[in-house]
Amino acid sequence: MKPVTTRIPEDDEEALTELEAEMSADRSEVLRRLIRQGLTDWRKERALEQLRQQSITLRKAAELADISYVEMLTLAAEEGIDVGYTADDLDRDLNRI
């Protein structure tokens, strides 16, 4: 792993202290988990935005977000993004398998 140093506001530091106790983890572990979750969310949002702009395919969006095709299809539907593939299409395809 690579060390990273940053400054945070005092109220965030207090929240980290609470999370440490809640998660029974040290500060480094809490920060690693928060960063990982933030990056995961950011990847999904970036992929959804590109999908919304129709600059990438559903399959490419899933790859960028590091999730399955079905998960991306579900996220796109929840966001109201028309990908030309409906839930009925998915049901039909799953029944064929």
Image (tube, rainbow, N blue to C red):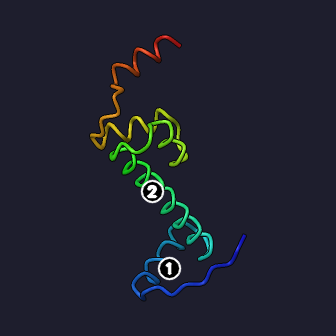
Q: Classify 10 Å Cα crowding around label 1: few (below 14), some (14-19), many (20 and above).
A: some
Q: CA distance from mark 2 to mark 1?
A: 23 Å
Residue 63, percent from left and from top = 54, 43
Q: Are the residues flagged by discs 2 and 1 in contact, CB closer than 8 Å?
A: no
Q: Classify 10 Å Cα crowding around label 2: few (below 14), some (14-19), many (20 and above).
A: few
The image shows residue 15, relative to residue 32, as above or below, that is below
* Secondary element type, mark 2: helix
Q: Residue furthest right?
A: 1
The image shows residue 69, relative to residue 13, as above or below, that is above
Q: Residue at 62% of width from left, 75% of height from top?
A: 28
As rendered, which of 14 and 93 lies closer to the eye? Answer: 93
Q: Earlier in the sequence, mark 2 or mark 1?
A: 1
- Please name the amino acid that badge 2 sits on: Asp
Residue 88, percent from left and from top = 33, 19
| Quarter in which the N terminus is drawn | bottom right
Q: Residue at 53% of width from left, 13% of height from top?
A: 97
- Please name the amino acid that badge 1 sits on: Thr
Q: Which mark is residue 96?
A: none
* Secondary element type, mark 1: helix
The residue wearing badge 2 is 41
Q: Residue furthest top?
A: 96
As rendered, which of 21 and 1 lies closer to the eye? Answer: 1
Image side of residue 81 versus residue 5, left or right: left
Q: Residue at 39% of width from left, 49% of height from top?
A: 50
Q: Residue furthest front?
A: 55
Residue 57, percent from left and from top = 44, 38
Image side of residue 1 versus residue 11, left or right: right
Q: Please identify the quarter of the rendering in which residue 77 is found.
A: top left
The image shows residue 88, relative to residue 29, as above or below, that is above
Residue 76, percent from left and from top = 36, 40
Q: Which mark is residue 17?
A: 1
